[in-house]
Image: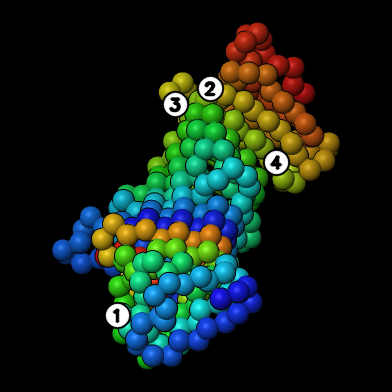
Amino acid sequence: MKCSVAEDFILKGGEFYDAKMDHTKQNASLKMSVNEDVILLNGIFTTDKSVTSEFIMTGIGTSRWIQKPLCKASLGNVTVASKHVLQIKGETFGDISKGHTFQISDGAELYCEKVVVKGEGEFVLESNAMLAIGHPEGIYSNGAKGNIQTQKRTYNSGATYYYYMNSNPQETGVFQTQPKQNVIGKLIVNKSSTSQVLNLSQNLLLESPCMVTLGDIRSNGFELKVKEVISTAKLN
Amino acid sequence: MDNGAMYIHNNTGWFPGLKNSLSPQSTQLFFNYGSNTFRPEIKFGNLVLDATEVSSLDLGGKVEQISGDFEIRKTGNDLSGIFFSGNSTLKIQGSFIQMGGLFLGCF
């Protein structure tokens, strides 16, 4: 089934499932695309009944994912499509279930604030996508630390990593990128005030110059190199 | 039906009219429905399901176009819901709003 929603998806109560499964309909799936906000206030929201179901945030522009703890959410595949910006607002985000993926597509952006994305599934940040990190611990490839805490995490070396919000100090976190290790496409720091700092938690090689809009970066004993000029940035 | 108009359906029979013109801000409210109520050629305005005593219903190939919001309030008792069989499509030009009931997705 394909379902497109041009405006908001709002769950205030009741139960929403992607698929009514039984042994004769294993291939059934729901592809649901939403152009504007997803607001989950109460009830049950389950999109992991089918391994091929997909919940797609799409359209050119910005939308919000607002989820309250009263809503019990089990997420299947969630995709932020190219040119779409998704801002996670509010208190929580549903668990990505085992065998499913939360994918930030090439050209898409995800703003996490301080909310943790977790679950037994996978998080994939594609090349040219942007991940905005507001958690004080940054992001990690392993362990229950930082914004992304899914079982498997894939951070692309061609993506943009944007550190923001008011945590002070904020850590970059320790994360592996691929296909190039410890390389990131762009690093942007845009804290809430000039006095707030981002501490490096590992050596990083940037594919393009670092952009500090507001705040500062501290080396914390690590190196930040810019590939184009092959020089170590001067850090306090 | 013009914008602002409301139609209330409270039986298990067909939605009336061989041809329908339902403006995006008109509302079609269903307190009851059955397997023959919905047809794919109907482009609803705001479609509201608020039915207390109905069985589960397959809307696949029957509800395909909603030019306003799709609002689900009640779909019968706790075990009754709506689902969409086959390779069906549903295009909602407004919002999907669920306040109660059971949306069972595809089947």
In the rendered view, does B103 fall on the left or right side of A187?
left
Say which quarter of the image contains residue B41.
bottom left
Q: Distance between the residues labelled 4 and 3?
A: 23 Å
Judging by the rendered image, the residue that carries numbered circle 1 is: B35
What is the crowding at mark 4: few (fewer than 14 residues within 10 Å), some, or many (at least 20)? Answer: many
What amino acid is found at the position of numbered circle 1 in the picture? Answer: Ser
User: Farthest residue in the left direction?
Assistant: A24
Q: How far apart are marks 3 and 2 (CA)?
A: 8 Å
Chain letter behind tag 4: A
Q: How far apart are marks 2 and 4 (CA)?
A: 20 Å
Please check whether the numbered discs 1 and 4 fall on a single chain: no
Say which quarter of the image contains residue B19.
bottom left
- Can you say which quadrant of the picture contains the N terminus of chain A? bottom left
Label annotation for residue A183: 2
Label annotation for residue A164: 4
What amino acid is found at the position of numbered circle 2 in the picture? Answer: Val
Asked whether A164 or A174 is in front, the reply is A164
Q: Distance between the residues labelled 1 and 2?
A: 58 Å
Judging by the rendered image, the residue that carries numbered circle 3 is: A178
What amino acid is found at the position of numbered circle 3 in the picture? Answer: Gln
Q: Is mark 2 on a helix, strand or loop?
A: strand
Please check whether the numbered discs 4 and 3 fall on a single chain: yes
